[in-house]
Amino acid sequence: MDAPLLSVRGLTKHFKPSAFSRGPVVRALEDVSFDVPRGSVVGLVGESGSGKTTIGRSILRLVEPTSGEVRFNGTDLTKLSTAELRKQRRFMQYIFQDPFASLSPRMTIGQILTEGLEIQGGLSREERSTRARQALAAVELPADAFNRYAHEFSGGQRQRIGIARALALDPQLIVADEPVSALDVSIQAQIVNLLRDLQQRLGLTMLFISHDLAVVEYICDTVIVLYLGRIMEIAPSAELYARPRHPYTRALLSAIPSPVPGDRRQRQLLTGDIPSPANPPSGCVFRTRCPYAIDACAAAVPPLETVGPGHLKACIRDDL
Amino acid sequence: MVAIALPRSNGPLARSLSRFVGNGAAVAGLMILLPVLIAVLTYDLWWPHAPNDIDLRALNKGPSAAHWFGTDGVGRDVLARLLQGGRISLLVAGVSVAISLVIGFLVGALAAFGGRITDGSTMRLVDLAMTLPPVILLLVLASIAGTGIVPTIFVISLLSWPVLSRMVRARLLELRERDFVVAARGMGANLWHLLFRHGLPNCIDILVVYATLQIANAILLEAGLSFLGLGIPPPEASWGNMLNAARSTVVLEQYVWQWMFPGAALVLAVLAINFIGDGLRDAFDPRSDLN
Ligand SMILES: Nc1ncnc2c1ncn2[C@@H]1O[C@H](COP(=O)(O)OP(=O)(O)OP(=O)(O)O)[C@@H](O)[C@H]1O
Ligand code: SF4
Ligand SMILES: [Mg+2]
């Protein structure tokens, strides 16, 4: 088998309080490891505050990880100098959640789309413009958008522009951070379909962040379930939905309304609040809300263990 | 195709401009300032008297056909001195504001992008500069730097950048976390790109408003310094030293034109510039679109 395009090992991020304010260290990520095979879409799900954005940004070193390795094409990005990293950046692009904040109000769409090419250098003005227009066409926006400003577009159109900006650099990896959760439900499907088409047509590798399990099931090959900065379960998409092994995944899945009326699947609703990442529980971080928790759960952090082909879970109870 | 054709609308700068044009006071300010500016810049083409020409037959003469604004105690034409003084005042104000714009922006940028330690130490320095009483600082600096155009410019610019650098820093700190700036970093942008492609355009409102209001302020500072004899020394004319020359009781009571015209020019110019500055501030504030 091919080596994965992206391979994350032991990724940890602790946000330290600023030099002038005293406060707790926020343990946003603890020892996160996973692979993203070339050409696949890996989903990252978890509740708000579980560290999804921090993973996405740490991978691209938009947030400086505290420790861990991020191997991209075999190169550990965390070890690169600023100049070396700059050269790698064209191969990995980010799509933002908020289509309003992610486009500069003072630049035309053309300037936004050519910005990355200009930064990376090596192309003439005409070539940059041609590439940007191709990207605009790829996201199905009219060519006359080129000389307009972002405020003239709707949320869905702006998100297309954000996607075009990422595509203009011809990247290998795209990190899409909840690309549809700020959009109207009616627009969400269009954007998800667009992303899927582009991914397949261009052979992109994608890390798709979402808190919507239904969207993730549709677009992803593999799903990673995150809770309080730790991975709870990793499984191929179909497998995860059919046979979730981790109590947290089960709780998440049972919270999705069933499309079949009268379906009385056993519903386990999550009770209680997520603990603060500044002061996570000992042992299994999920134990304060886990219906199956036993005393041993508090003792040690459960390791991610293989329970099937490509299926891993971090739970000490194998009887579940 | 998903996108519907939208009516073309203008960029953010064009929209600010149209808001400015709709502001009565600001446009009035511009109507006052523009003729004054043109007169000041072109007076030697159409006014027969030079600012330092002495007419010994006309000492302390009131306004007449030959000397519209009268003459001063040594027979110099007040209008010519007023217009030359305007040149000097505007030159000093313009150059010192330009200098403090550059310093203020760069220091603000250094604080915002330079990391915690640079930020902390730069801002303590700015705090220090801001807590010193400006009048005293001005007097001390002026007595060290001496009199003349260049020292006056130096003193005024040194006094006025700290406020700007605070505003620029606050704006850039906020900007740094905005998604489109993170996107630029994600595409490999260096500090230079971030500063001049994102930082500067998004500070343009602060800079323009500051520059306008600060020009008015600098005109006043120059007048104040010159009035105290620390700014532009005679025989060079400036609005401040014209007022200084006219401060004796005799002049005050009997030769009203010698101080009234420079005084009025000062007040009018400063007011007009302030109106323009306020208008620009409103024009750049997106919330004013809602009204
Ligand atoms: N710059 C920062 N400084 C301090 N703490 C941070 C910072 N960024 C994120 N955090 C904290 O790290 C944790 C994870 O945040 P993150 O934004 O990665 O979560 P998320 O899963 O993306 O949530 P959401 O679904 O709301 O986007 C949160 O507790 C958050 O408060
Ligand atoms: S380790 Fe214990 S607390 Fe954690 S999920 Fe498994 S059973 Fe629940
Ligand atoms: Mg997030």
Image (cartoon, grey):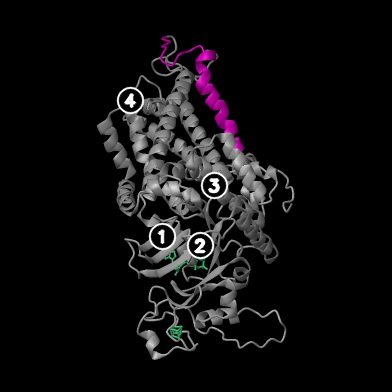
Mark 4 or 1: the one toward you? 1
Provide the residue span drawn in magenta. B27-56
Which numbered marker is on residue A169? 3
Q: Is residue A185 visible?
A: yes
Alpha carbon separation for disc pair 1 and 3: 21 Å
Give how far apart the Cα atoms at labels 3 and 4 are: 56 Å
Residue B25 appears anywhere in the view: no
Distance, label 2 to label 1, CA atoms, is: 14 Å
- Image: B264 above or below A143: above
Q: Is residue B103 left or right of residue A115?
A: left
On residue B148, which mark appears? 4
Residues at marks 1 and 3 on the same chain: yes
Of the numbered discs in the image, which one, if any, rests on residue A70? 1
Residue A261 drawn in magenta: no
Residue at (37%, 85%) from the top-left corner? Answer: A298
Give the foreground label among 2 and 1: 2
Kind of residue at badge 4: Gly
Residue of label 2: A37
Q: Earlier in the sequence, mark 2 or mark 1?
A: 2
